Image (cartoon, coloured by chain):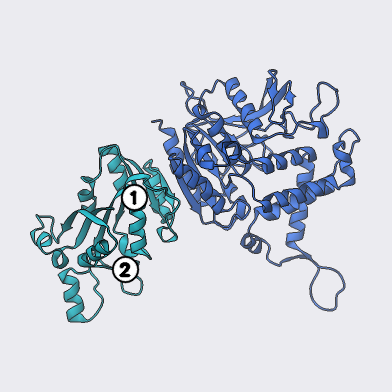
Amino acid sequence: MRLDLTHIQRWIEPDSKVLDLGCGNGEFLQRLYTERGVRGLGLEIDPNEITAAVARGLNVIEQNMDAGLDNFPDQSFDTVVMAHALQAVHYPDKVLEEMLRIGRQGIVTFPNFGHWSCRFYLGTRGRMPVSRFMPHNWYDTPNIHFCTVTDFETLCAERGIRILARDMVGNTERKPLLASAMPNLFAVTAIYLISR
Amino acid sequence: MNTSRIGVVTPSRARFSEPLLLACGRTLSEYELVYETYGELNADRSNAVLICHALSGNHHAAGYHSAEDRKPGWWDECVGPGKPIDTNHFHVVCLNNLGGCHGSTGPASVNPETGQSWGPDFPSLRVRDWVHSQARLADHLGIDCWAAVIGGSLGGMQAMRWALLYPQRLRHCVVIASALKLSAQNIAFNEIARQAIQSDPDFAGGHYLSKGLVPAQGLALARMVGHITYLSDDAMASKFGRDLRSGTLEPGTELGAEFQVQSYLRHQGSRFSNNFDANTYILMTQALDYFDLAREYGNDPVAAFREARCSFLVLSFSTDWRFSPGRSREIVNALIAADRSVTYAEIAADGGHDAFLMPIRRYLDVFSAYMQRVREPH
């Protein structure tokens, strides 16, 4: 289980209804179901991931977020989760607004492009960073909208989105003191609980 | 490709003498349904699956009718041991619908009141009439609740109607390449098919049987136009292209050339006209045209689906323009808005509408994965 998903779990109420945007093979939704009795629905576009999620007994809808989410009624889910997909959608701001229209609360995780190693890479080599967390070249990356922790919080402020809680994951799994103290510089992954 | 391990199957027949009140207001005093079953019914009768056939289908979904039979049943790719509808685990029932021409009571049957074949006087049927008659077949077989009701195209419409009319009698509903209702374009194609049949002089106003005639030309034409709409442009291009069956297009010859696609269509048409009853074709296309899942729910499919209690799997195929993915998404969106359990996949396939009958890897995989869940009752 990816570390960010473990963090997310505690913000999700038992027996609630969760929409997972970009649910992959459904590992997270299945865990929410078995551990918290959560009624989940996943959105996914990768055919093999969809089959894998269906094989887990999950409900999945093949749908591209970039084509809109207006088929989901207002406030029809307790929580809408989008883990590590914000940077890959065409209109991140619109997806955030949609998440909070559909769900009572939203949970967003993304890789922090402001991390010191990205800055160092770009600063010293003058090239777009490629690392274990960002393994793609600039021309073939699905990550078309990288942002930093500060960028994200600025957007939330501009759009009247409330940040209810945030969690920062650093380079190691030990207590992320640096990542929590100076997230824009030291957080590898940023995790937010948001609402209107 | 796939060799069916169901082997030779023998159809069964059930007779119903309790009158069936039809949507048109008329009553069938008695009728017969012919059906096939594959796989064993388990002790608590919880593993039964109903397959509803499409426009030109019948009860013979899988296996062979004799050792010499060259072609298996129409859905043999999906029904059998190790296939999505796995007969090692499910007891599968497939019937010829009322009004059909493969053994169940229909226009070619004898009207007990006149002693003559019904012909065009056979009552007009709606999808719901089929569902009610299928429910009686379930009673007859001792099946209180289907593990799943499954259908493609017109069969998917029956499956959805089941979910609304008998919500307690199915746990899952599988709707493949179907729609909430036909579009004007779809109805138009059906009208061409009916006109082709009705304008054949041998149709004789529907009384061809009593006159010893067969409107073969009209039926063939109806099938040809239908068949084109079941294929995609790409599928026809890759199957036939502009290949010639005979003749040449070289200058200097006056003899006409014949394209492969022409001969293929004629073959399909003539084969169909030998195996299908014209009045049944008209009846089935009308049932298709008249179907509108949400009409009596204030034309609101969300309100309609609130009646349902089962889980849904909806599948569509990318190049299907007769029942396009957009039509399936309307079903899915209504189910989402009605807060029903639904899974949806859009299969990339070049086979057009007929793709639902084909062994497409991803289709079989996701269908199998879902049926796995049907096997494990919650």
The residue located at (74%, 38%) in the rendering is B283
Extreme residue in the top direction: B17
Task: Kindly tell me whether residue A22 is visible in this rendering.
Answer: no
Q: Which chain is blue?
A: B
Label 2, on which residue? A145
Q: Specify the amino acid type for callout 1.
A: Asp
Quadrant, the C terminus of chain B: top left
For residue B193, side relative to residue A131 (left or right): right
For residue A149, side relative to residue B222 (left or right): left
The residue located at (59%, 26%) in the rendering is B135
Query: How many numbered discs?
Result: 2
Label 1, on which residue? A20
For residue A79, side relative to residue B343 (left or right): left
The residue located at (29%, 37%) in the rendering is A15
Can you give x and y, in whole percent of width and height, for residue B133 in the image? 64, 27
Secondary structure category for the residue under label 2: loop
Q: Which chain is cyan?
A: A
Q: Is residue A186 above or below residue A125?
A: above
In front of the other: B318 or B125: B125
Q: Is residue B259 above or below residue B68?
A: below
Count residues near mark 2 (Cα–Cα under 10 Å), then give few for <14, some for 14-19, many for 20+.
some
